[in-house]
């Protein structure tokens, strides 16, 4: 056994305190390192019956070889078997087929540089794996939640955020446009994903995710936390505007008023957290017409016509006053775009004058189509009358020719008809 003293245990406790790696993991790593160093020194890589044991009371560590007790050792299996007579010298109570542990700890000076390097690599690898698994398990549980971190640095287009035991990455697509991220500032981020890598897990966080607004409302509004008020849908364009559809499960609780708070205190806290991002809170409704009207607020709506309503397509036509058209559409179409995301309805907006113009054009087109159809019918009737007149004229000419022929031959009309029928037969 090799005496290592109490310094090792103090180092293990310090490592557990600073990095959160359990003491048992560190001690197990040290034992594995001793086995690796022994195998490297004795050149027995394939030996599976070698183990290291650490006595925490005495502070000693040793390498032991486990052998099977047999009557007589077979040739070539001296490293795996031990005779009963020799085993009795170690333990008088052993019997055939028992296993005994024989200490094979070499002297410290027998461990060479290569063996020490192998032990170091094993300890480093085991500690890294333990730290990696610990971070992975911790942040797997935090995936899809809101956490607070500190901005460490900006690397290219990525922002590195320290979130405790790991540094998270905020890609440019998860950042708020125009936002300046200063190192040292505290920031609330949403854990989007945790990717497992060969080293420490890579944690992807977002400052532009719509769930951030939802989490903030759950923190600030007790009614949401108690499931009295429910967030049905959310649509966000980070840094500019967010629409939130809420519903109250209690008829006596106003869902919109609960989210706004007394004198707007609750929503103002969230707006400040989001750097003055505009937030529209609308009332959810099962009626699609009412829901679309609420989603397009603050614009006034004249009418909503449902054009298509099935599982795949949902389309509605919305008519607004002329002075409300720009407000309903929003800057660069932002208001109607967020309303579409919020309601999952395709919304086409027209003003009253545009609808009247469209109706006039439709009526004119209808009249034009009617006139064209009427002219076509008249032309067809005229052509039919011409055909009939031509047939009548042709028959009159034939009759005149027949009469003239009868007069020339002196044949009676009745006889001429009979002869014509017989010739036809």
Image (cartoon, rainbow, N blue to C red):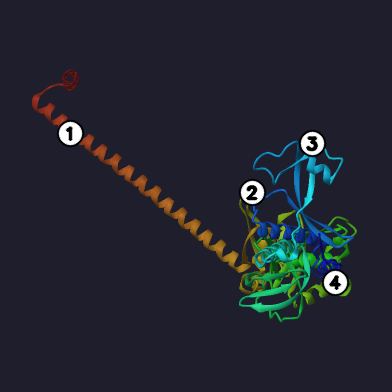
Dots 4 and 1: beta carbons under 8 Å?
Answer: no
- Label 3 to label 1, Cα distance in Å? 141 Å
The answer to whether the residue labelled 2 contacts the one labelled 3, judged by CB atoms less than 8 Å apart, is no
Where disc 4 sits, the SS reads helix
Q: Earlier in the sequence, mark 2 or mark 3?
A: 3
Label 3 residue SS: loop
206 is higher (above) or lower (below) than 46: below
Residue 8, percent from left and from top: 82, 67
Label drawn at residue 400: 1
Residue 359 can be seen in this image:
yes
- Label 4, residues with CA under 10 Å away: few <14, some 14-19, many ≥20: some
Q: CA distance from mark 4 to mark 1?
A: 106 Å
- Is disc 1 placed on a helix, strand or loop? helix
Other-residue count near label 3 (Cα within 10 Å), few / some / many at <14 / 14–19 / ≥20: few
- State the image quarter where residue 36 is shown: bottom right
Q: Residue at x 55, y 63 (%)?
A: 360
Q: Which residue is mark 2?
A: 311
Out of 117 and 240, give the one closest to the viewer: 117
| 68 lies above or below 217 | above
- Label 1 crowding class (10 Å Cα cut-off): few <14, some 14-19, many 20+? few
Query: How far separated are the C-alphas under marks 2 and 3?
Result: 76 Å
In x, y percent, where is residue 233?
Answer: 74, 60
Q: Earlier in the sequence, mark 2 or mark 1?
A: 2
Nearer to us: label 2 or label 1: 2
Residue with the mark numbered 3: 96
Q: Nearer the viewer, mark 3 or mark 1?
A: 3
Residue in the foreground of this view, choosing between 412 and 6: 6
How far apart marks 2 and 1 lie (CA) works out to 75 Å
Q: What quarter of the picture does the C terminus occupy?
A: top left
Q: What label does residue 266 carry, if any?
A: 4
Say which element carries label 2. loop
Q: Earlier in the sequence, mark 2 or mark 4?
A: 4
């Amino acid at each position: 056994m090799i005496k290592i003293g109490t310094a090792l245990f103090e180092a293990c406790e310090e490592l557990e305190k600073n990095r959160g790696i359990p003491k048992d993991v560190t001690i197990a790593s040290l034992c594995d390192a001793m086995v690796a160093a022994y195998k490297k020194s004795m050149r027995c890589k394939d030996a599976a019956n070698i183990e290291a044991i650490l006595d925490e009371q005495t502070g000693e560590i040793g390498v032991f070889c486990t052998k099977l007790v047999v009557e007589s050792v077979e040739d070539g299996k001296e490293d795996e078997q031990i005779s009963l007579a020799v085993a009795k010298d170690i333990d008088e109570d052993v019997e055939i087929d028992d296993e005994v542990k024989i200490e094979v700890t070499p002297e410290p000076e027998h461990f060479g540089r290569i063996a020490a390097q192998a032990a170091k690599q094993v300890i480093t690898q085991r500690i890294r794996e333990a730290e990696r698994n610990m971070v992975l398990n911790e942040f797997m549980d935090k995936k899809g939640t809101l956490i607070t971190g500190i901005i460490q640095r900006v690397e290219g287009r990525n922002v590195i955020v320290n979130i405790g035991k790991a540094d998270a990455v905020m890609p440019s697509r998860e950042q708020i446009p125009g936002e300046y991220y200063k190192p040292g500032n505290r920031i609330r981020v949403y854990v989007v994903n945790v990717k497992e890598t060969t080293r420490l897990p890579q944690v992807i966080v977002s400052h532009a995710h719509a769930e951030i607004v939802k989490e903030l409302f759950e923190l600030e509004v007790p009614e949401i936390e108690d499931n009295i008020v429910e967030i049905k849908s959310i649509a966000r364009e980070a840094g500019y505007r967010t629409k939130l559809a809420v519903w109250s499960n209690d008829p006596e609780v106003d869902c919109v008023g609960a989210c706004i708070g007394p004198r707007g205190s609750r929503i103002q806290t969230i707006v400040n957290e989001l750097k003055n991002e505009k937030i529209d809170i609308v009332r959810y409704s099962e009626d699609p017409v009412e829901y679309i009207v609420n989603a397009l607020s603050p614009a006034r709506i004249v009418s909503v016509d449902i054009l298509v309503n099935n599982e795949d397509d949902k389309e509605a036509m919305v008519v607004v006053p002329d002075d409300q058209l720009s407000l309903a559409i929003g800057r660069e179409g932002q208001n109607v775009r967020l309303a579409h995301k919020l309601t999952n309805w395709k919304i086409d907006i027209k003003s009253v004058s545009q609808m009247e113009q469209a109706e006039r054009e439709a009526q004119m087109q209808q009249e034009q189509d009617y006139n064209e159809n009427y002219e076509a019918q008249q032309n067809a009737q005229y052509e039919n009358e011409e055909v009939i007149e031509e047939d009548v004229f042709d028959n009159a000419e034939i009759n005149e020719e027949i009469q003239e022929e009868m007069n020339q031959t002196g044949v009676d009309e009745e006889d001429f008809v009979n002869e014509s029928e017989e010739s036809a037969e």
